[in-house]
Image (cartoon, rainbow, N blue to C red):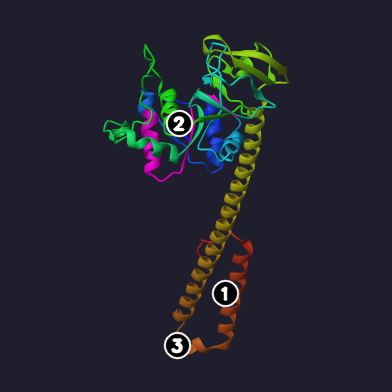
Amino acid sequence: MLVPVYASAEPETQALLDVLASRGYVVRTLRNASQVDLARSTLATEALRDGFKETFWIDADQVFDPDDVDRIRKLNRPLVCGLYSCKGPKRLAGKFMPDAGKVKFGKGGGLVEIEFGGMGFCCVRAEVYRAMEPGLPRCSGGYEGKDVVPYFIPMLTGDAPPCYLSEDYSFFARARQVGYPLICDTRIKVGHVGKKTYTWDDLQPDRPLESLEVEMGREGKIELTSATPKGPAMQIIKDELLQEQACLDQQEAQAREEISNAQATMAEASSRLQSIHGAKQLLAHLVRKIEAKTPPEELAAEEDCKKLQEEFRQQTEAMVAKNGEATDKKTE
């Protein structure tokens, strides 16, 4: 999981990244990433250098169903994304192919080739980066002083006048040039956090949708053609987080129980140690009493030996029976 962050991730996004981390995913965050093309290139270069075969980009202001990460990976495609809405304007952050026709999102959706999309929720396999490398130099000046391959450096189109492409559009343009078209899974719903969470529901204001259908309109804009309402939107997020919270609560209770058991074992061992220490003190005291008897022949007196042995036995048993009570008082 590669996450470029300017200041900090949105709380909703961070909670979902924590869910992915708890499932075993490696989450790498590059903070203070004010130059997003350089940040993405740095993260990608480091991931490939460390031997990762696949990267999954999640922007710091996205909300999503964590299960959709697994769904996209299981598609076994080199370049797949989930589309999301722009903040504010009622439009999707992407561009369909000119001949796309009508495209359905949500229930009834599927895989569709698109020309451009956002990197905010996108799976890219290492082979895509590798195919780009022959046309790209290895540069100095990456974040933290590292060398970097500029996979995301902005580029200009060959139009007249040329169009300046953003870092994500530039990446997808390069990928297409080396034989990797961008595929979008329109069943995936991704939210874009701003003053509110924007999803493709916002193409039909104030109506959470189960599905919608769009097509390319004039000037390449995506226009809504039909929509199917549904219940509360983005419920997947709350349900998923509550499930993960219950799992973490259970793990916390188990850890606390283990700590409690360990503390009880330590207390028991400490109590036994105190009893043994007290018994040793008593034994040494009785030995000194025997050695203090004069003349020496009295040491062999059977009656005195039995008396001392019985005294030692009784006092030792009394100490052990107390099981941890104070036993460090000297026996006089």
Secondary structure type for disc 2 = strand
Instruction: Report helix, strand or loop for mark 1.
Output: helix
Name the amino acid, label 2.
Answer: Val
- Residue 204 as seen in the image, left or right of residue 116: right
Crowd around label 3: few <14 · some 14–19 · many ≥20 (10 Å)? few
Q: Position of residue 101 (x, y in %)?
A: 61, 19
Reading the image, the residue beneath label 3 is: 296
Q: Secondary structure at mark 3?
A: helix
Q: Nearer the viewer, residue 279 or 182?
A: 182
**Residue at mark 2:** 3
Q: Mark 1 or mark 3, which is nearer the start of the sequence?
A: 3
Name the residue type under label 3.
Pro
Measured as percent of width and height from the top left, residue 160 is found at 37, 12
Where is residue 190? Give x, y as percent. Answer: 58, 25
- Report the side of 38 relative to 331 (left or right): left
Q: Which one is earlier in the sequence, the residue at label 2 or at label 1?
A: 2
Whole-number angstrom distance, CA of label 3 to CA of label 2: 87 Å
Whether residue 272 is visible, yes or no, is yes
Residue numbers of the magenta segment: 39-64
Can residue 286 be found in the magenta stretch?
no
Amino acid type shown at disc 1: Phe
Q: Residue at x 53, y 44 (%)?
A: 24
Nearest the viewer among 284 and 195 is 195
Question: Compared with residue 305, is residue 233 higher up or lower down, i.e. above or below?
Answer: above
Which residue, given by chain and number where applicable, does mark 1 sit on? 312
